[in-house]
Image: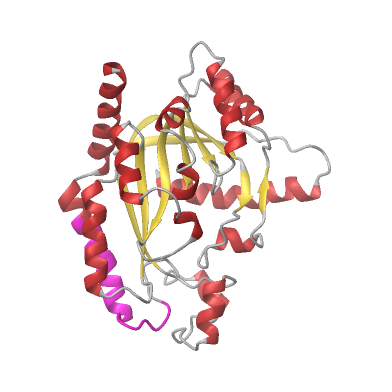
Amino acid sequence: MIPSLIEFIRDVNLSLVTIKFKNEKPFKMPTLLQKMSILSITAGMQGIIIAALGCPNGCDFCVTSHYWKRRYIPYFKSGYEIYTQIKKYKRDHGLNAVIIIDEEFLLNRKRALEYLECIRKERHWDVHLMCFSSIKALSQYSLEELMEMNLEIVWLGYEAHGAGYAKMEGKNPDELIRELQSHGIAVLASSIIGYDYQTREVIEKEFQTLMTVEPSFTQFLIYSPVYGTPLYDRLKKENRLLPGFDDPRRYRHKEIDGFTLQHRHPHLSQQEASEIVEELYKKDYELLGPSIIRIARVWFEGYLRMIEN
């Protein structure tokens, strides 16, 4: 489901940009629906809401942030507008699952709480949300507030313990994941390897720490200097880009994929980095099992907690 969603977002992005910047009329959200499947079996439809472009965090590797020059461009400025769009999906298509495409949907606490207030006025609200977020954003809310929003899955920029980004400030990331999942909110922990401080031993230690919190999904990617990002500029200035990776035309080819080291690393070769990523995925599966079972357990435990209270 996740890879196809990313492809879908890529395909609609340019048309949305055209609507926003070349049309003087108020933005009208197009109907975006995606079929969900589990083991190739259709499991219903979900609505997709493109709530904003860009990201204010400005992480050095992030294309989303730097494509828009660290601007945050919201399509929906109030929680009421988001609520209205979701209610339209529910009314017109009978959907009870929506994904919010916004790199930091929960960072704007005022807007999120406006959305929550709209839900609280409903007699019955069964629409579940998936969204992208950060430790900093999630740390602004109580677990009760997140549960009332019907937050079902959160894609969390876990990165690495020593990454040092401002968006990682707030609660301890491992404690945060435990708290969320114990209350029925599944976490996709997106992790990065390839920071200069990381040796193979450090990566293994950080991986084992992540495994102790048992995220429902995990993503492991190599720290990649994509053309146009500050990371690319820094590594190019330091003459650390591997041959060919300073050519933007290479981005048409599959080696620009998050699984191939593109620069000279103080501790890892290109082959070692790719091998480590593959090893981490295999170990994750061996230790925690398939994500479909992991997420079902999280939701069931969250359900038990709610009926007990």
Q: Is residue 281 highlighted in magenta? A: yes
The answer to whether residue 227 is above or below residue 238 is above
Q: Main secondary structure of the magenta part?
A: helix
The answer to whether residue 116 is above or below residue 241 is above
At x 42% / y 28%, what residue is drawn?
144
Q: Nearer the viewer, residue 25 or 167?
A: 167
Query: Furthest-right residue in view?
Result: 24
Give, as a single range, the part of the protein colored magenta.
262-283
Residue 80 visible to an observer of this rendering: yes
Q: If the image is split into quadrants, where does the N terminus sit?
A: top left
Q: Is residue 214 left or right of residue 3?
A: left
Query: Furthest-left residue in view?
Result: 286
Q: Is residue 201 left or right of residue 60?
A: left
The answer to whether residue 55 is above or below residue 89 is below
Query: Furthest-top residue in view?
Result: 123
Q: Is residue 158 left or right of residue 6?
A: left
Q: If the image is split into quadrants, where does the C terminus sit?
A: top left
Question: How many marks can you see?
Answer: 0
Where is residue 146 drawn, in percent x and y?
Answer: 45, 32
At x 24% / y 73%, what residue is drawn?
200
Residue 40 visible to an observer of this rendering: no
Where is residue 145 drawn, in percent x and y?
Answer: 46, 29
The answer to whether residue 194 is above or below residue 34 is below
At x 51% / y 20%, what residue is drawn?
94
Colouring of the image? secondary structure
Location of residue 272 (image quadrant): bottom left
Q: Nearer the viewer, residue 163 or 207?
A: 163
Where is residue 170 drawn, in percent x and y?
Answer: 44, 50
Q: Nearer the viewer, residue 38 or 152?
A: 152
Q: Is residue 178 highlighted in magenta? A: no
Where is residue 46 drawn, in percent x and y?
Answer: 48, 32
